[in-house]
Amino acid sequence: MNRIIELINKLEKEHILPKSELAYIIENHTPETDEYLFERARRIREAHYGKDVYIRGLIEFTNYCKNDCLYCGIRRSAKQAERYRLTEEQILSCCESGYALGFRTFVLQGGEDNFYTDELMVKIISEIKSRYTDCALTLSIGEKSRESYEAYFAAGADRYLLRHETADSAHYSRLHPKNLSLENRKRCLSDLKSIGFQTGCGFMVGSPYQTAENLAEDLIYIHELQPHMVGIGPFIPHHDTPFADEKAGTLEMTLLMLGLVRLILPNVLLPATTALGTIHPKGREKGILAGANVVMPNLSPKDVRKKYLLYDNKICTGDEAAECIKCLGNRMNSIGYRLVTDRGDWKN
Ligand code: SAH
């Protein structure tokens, strides 16, 4: 039997492989072995979540950031970024329109912006959770102290997304400024998990200097951490960053990673990301067909959308949330899946 097929079968059974075998798949997979993998991944996904696709309303509430990650379009030194912050009132009005559209999870994402003190975040979290008792709230606001995470959790936040970006510390330091470390990123993730958040890590595919070994290490770290969610999207260059002239990650490699992660963590919440939809017109549909089960349409006010540009050519920045949800609904139906009105919690 084909060596790749053999390894995919072994991964499905044992949920992890030695690094060399993961790297072997990454370097030698073919369209045929991909089809086999995706078929296995869909079967596993459907056993846990059926044909349901969960939606998360993404509220990009600030593009101020104190960090200077080399890949990111809202990094501190990105001079062209037009900075904005949403008020508590504006955030609540996003939730209101999102609720009416069927969203039962709101995701507050932003740069690391100290304007939003823990006190202010706790106020916003408490207000959202008291108005929308049947909704889950996810935060994606970067690296904080354990005490801060505890305060957000006590205020009612349910989930936290913090991509680890790469599990290789040398690679990490080529993507980030000196003051940031993989060690602290991992500390944050283990704090978040032990506090009780449904926790998400993740990485970019095709980031500068990334090797097949690095991707294998990402998969091994994911298996170690056992997160509830994993965010995976292609790296896409942004013109106002040091990586402006680097190549984007590919559709093929991103789909491969989604399929492999579904075999490693059978019940993971796995988004088909906006970045995947940006590099290919059918990217999100293909992501679902490779084992993903979540989409995260934008709920940010229309006038700020074009300002939250982590990478160039981001899709859906001109549409109202209602249009996005209709379009995504049609896209999911076209491949035999359905968007559902549900908190979409992790299932054990
Ligand atoms: N400040 C928060 C949110 C970051 S934005 C945090 O630190 O977690 C969310 C994700 O977008 C990042 O984790 C990163 O993986 C991704 N991202 C940033 N720049 C990108 C780019 N140029 N291409 C693709 N994804 C990018």
Image (cartoon, grey):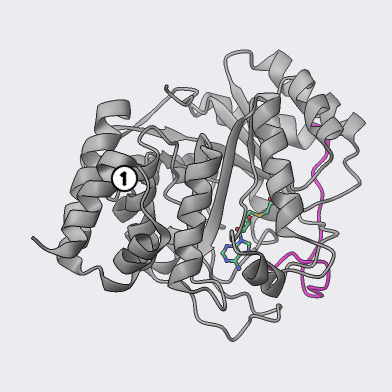
Q: Picture coordinates of residue 240 (x, y %)?
A: 71, 78
Q: Give the main secondary structure, helix, strand or loop, of the magenta stretch.
A: loop
| In the displayed structure image, the side of residue 336 where residue 348 appears, left or right | right
Q: What's drawn in magenta, residue-wise?
A: 71-88
Where 175 sits versus 120, above or below? below
Instruction: Quadrant for residue 7, please give it.
Output: bottom left
Q: Which residue is mark 1?
A: 291
Q: Is residue 89 left or right of residue 104?
A: right
- Seen from the viewer's position, the closer of residues 42 and 58 is 42
Percent position (x, y) of residue 96? Answer: 64, 26
What is the quadrant of the C terminus in the image? top left
Q: In this orientation, which residue lies closer to the viewer: 205 or 121?
A: 205
The amino acid type of the residue labelled 1 equals Gly
10 Å crowding of disc 1: few (<14), some (14-19), many (20+): many
Q: Quadrant of ligand 1?
A: bottom right
- What's the residue at 66%, 71% (across, down)? 170
Identify the residue at image location x=57%, y=77%. 208
Q: Residue at x 69, y 53 (%)?
A: 303
Q: Is residue 147 magenta?
A: no
Give the SS element for disc 1.
Answer: loop
**Residue 113 screen position, x and y as percent:** 85, 50
On the question of residue 337 being in view, the answer is: no
Residue visible at 60% across and 35% down in the picture: 199
Nearer the observer, 7 or 331: 7
Q: Which quadrant is the N terminus positioned in?
A: bottom left
Label 1 residue near ligand 1, CB within 8 Å: no
The answer to which of 109 and 5 lies nearer the viewer is 5
Q: Is 3 displayed left or right of 294 in the figure?
A: left
Asked whether residue 86 is drawn in magenta, I would say yes
Q: Position of residue 97 (x, y in %)?
A: 60, 30
Q: Is residue 139 above or below residue 70?
A: above
